[in-house]
Amino acid sequence: MTAELPPLPAGAKPFELFRRADLQQVEKADLVLFTDCLAAAGYPEERAVATGPGAVAVALLRPVVTPRTEVEARRYGFGAPASAVQAEVVRKDSAFYQVASQCEQSARAQLGDPREVGALRDRYTELGNALVQDRAKRVTAILTDYGTRLSACLAGRGYALPAGRTFDARGDLSQYGIIRGHHDPVPTPARSPGGVEIRPAIPARAYRPSQAEVVFALAFVRCGVSTGLFAELDRSERAIEQEIVERHVAEFHGLNPRIEALAQRAAEVLRDR
């Protein structure tokens, strides 16, 4: 019997079959249990600086092509702000690593069999990565199909490709001779003496597109509209996602009930603490 996809609420997109919130709940519980264990063993710094797990499968939330509007083009060019980075504890104490290994096992044991918990998290993360990669391939194919029209439109706006070159959907701005901008620099962390160093958190950093990048981004947006590229991406989005999730039906069928149950267990563990 062929496995069927889990049901989706009316109006939901196919990629919403991927239980990001459940995976995030598991990651949150694991972090809390792990850092509590370290603190009890005499290593409280990790718990002090932990603000929560990073966003999981965040690439699923990103637009497939950017920029899509002139506002985005003027503000970001082809870039995006850099996400904040949590504070980090760097240790030189070799005994710590043995304790950390034990605490990792202890944390997972409170959620279930440690090996099964670790394997399920890894497999579900791999599923999210597969969705992103499969979608990227389909979007690249659409960009390639529109390559002739897009490159002709850009050429009409003063951005002709060098002689003998054709539009490369996988290429970057360098194929048009555009130099990218940059993110604001990362602050230099203060060094701490002794066996432990706490590297401070890095706030989210703005992306500063180059002026040439902004002008080219505006041309790209206008050509994306006039060639029908953006309309095709919007028109195809749901069908692409549906085709991809159907390709992974066995994984969704086998993993979704398990990640949902593990997330429920994680919520119970946190509620009882």
Image (cartoon, grey):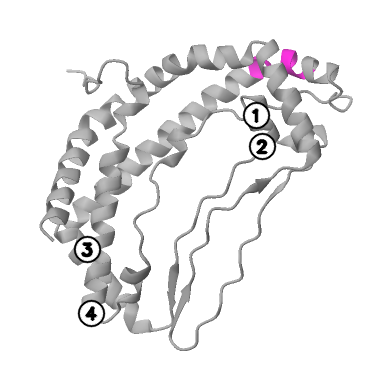
Residue 250 sits above or below residue 40 on the image: above
Residue 252 drawn at (x, y percent): 26, 30
Residue at image location 47% in from the left, 18% down from the top: 237
Label 1 Cα neighbours within 10 Å, binned few <14 / some 14-19 / many ≥20 = few
In this picture, is 257 found above or below 269?
above
Quadrant of image for the N terminus: top left
Q: Tell me if 212 is positioned left or right of 39 in this view.
A: right
Is the C-beta separation of discs 4 and 3 under 8 Å? no
- Which sits earlier in the primary sequence, circle 3 or circle 2? 3
Left of 225 or right of it: where is 235?
left
Which residue in the protein does label 1 denote?
71
Residue at 84% across, 16% down: 156
- In the current view of this chain or complex, which residue is farthest to the bottom? 194
Residue 41 image offset from top left, x and y in percent: 23, 79
Residue 5 placement: quadrant: top left
| Marks 1/4: CA–CA distance | 51 Å
**Is residue 21 rendered magenta in the image?**
no
Which of pointers 4 and 3 lies earlier in the amino acid sequence? Answer: 3
Residue ID for mark 2? 75
SS for callout 3? helix
Q: Do tag 2 and tag 1 residues touch (Cβ < 8 Å)?
A: yes
Q: Position of residue 241 (x, y in %)?
A: 41, 21
